């Protein structure tokens, strides 16, 4: 029963819009499905950073230390705002394909890691969420790793579906540029808003 409750809660967390989904959609608009999927791999690895941090106590240190929390928070927020502003300010002619702004799968992969790894809210969510489904009879660290990996897998699956959905929307030649522009603006705006929200996050919330 506890496992079913965990899976349900993890799915709800996975489908909740966040920096990861906004970023992978933005990369799909800019560089197509290849860059989008590469960014999904990056955000997945970034998520594993939080899993290991939660398992070995770094997240607890960040949550308890105002200096460490603020450092990670503001760096992550600034990076999100930067990526979002870059999407919003990019000017693409109406008849041009958005792939002219592609930066390559390697860049998308690297940025995906940074976006997710610097999301301090993910660390705090993992810290507060995962221990609720552990049992006292087994080592805590190993349980957190297993549960965290399940969460990351679900998050990555949702990111991949978002990429495939965005790519499908852009397949049609009719109004392709218009759709790309809308997706780009929405993703960019979402990242800016999330960055501002992250910058105002408080410890212990």
Image (cartoon, grey):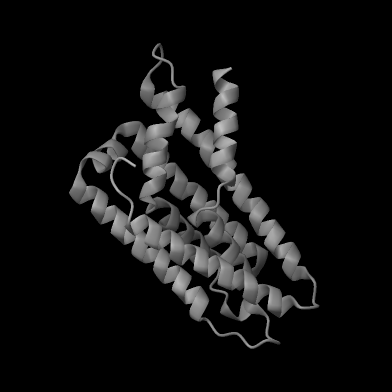
Which residue lies at the image location 64% right of the left edge and 73% below the top edge? 182
Residue 15: x, y in percent? 59, 46
Which residue lies at the image location 52% right of the left edge and 37% below the top edge? 151
Residue 34: x, y in percent? 64, 63
Asked whether 72 or 114 is in front, the reply is 72
Residue 116 higher or lower than 89, as above or below: above
Which residue lies at the image location 66% right of the left edge and 74% below the top edge? 180
Asked whether 154 or 52 is in front, the reply is 154
Q: In this view, does 1 lie to the left or right of 178?
A: left
Residue 59 higher or lower than 201, as above or below: above
**Residue sitting at the far top:** 137
Residue 20 higher or lower than 47, as above or below: below
Q: Quadrant for residue 183, please give it.
A: bottom right
Residue 78: x, y in percent? 35, 65
- Residue 31 visible from this viewpoint: no
Q: What quarter of the picture does the C terminus occupy?
A: top left
């Amino acid at each position: 029963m506890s496992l079913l409750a965990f899976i349900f809660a993890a799915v709800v967390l996975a489908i909740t819009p966040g920096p990861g989904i906004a970023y992978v959609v933005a990369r799909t608009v800019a560089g197509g499905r290849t860059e989008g999927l590469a960014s999904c791999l990056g955000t997945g690895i970034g998520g594993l950073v939080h899993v290991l941090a939660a398992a070995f106590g770094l997240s607890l240190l960040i949550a308890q230390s105002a200096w460490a929390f603020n450092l990670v928070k503001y760096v992550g927020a600034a990076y999100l705002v930067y990526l979002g502003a870059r999407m919003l300010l990019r000017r693409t002619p109406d008849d041009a394909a958005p792939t002219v702004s592609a930066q390559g799968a390697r860049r998308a992969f690297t940025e995906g890691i940074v976006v997710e790894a610097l999301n301090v809210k993910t660390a705090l969510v993992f810290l507060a969420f995962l221990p609720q489904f552990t049992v006292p009879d087994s080592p805590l660290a190993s349980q957190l790793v297993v549960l965290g990996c399940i969460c990351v897998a679900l998050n990555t699956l949702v990111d991949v579906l978002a990429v495939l959905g965005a790519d499908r929307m852009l397949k049609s030649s009719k109004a392709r540029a218009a759709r790309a522009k809308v997706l780009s603006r929405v993703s960019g705006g979402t990242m800016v808003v999330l960055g501002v929200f992250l910058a105002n996050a408080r410890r212990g919330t």
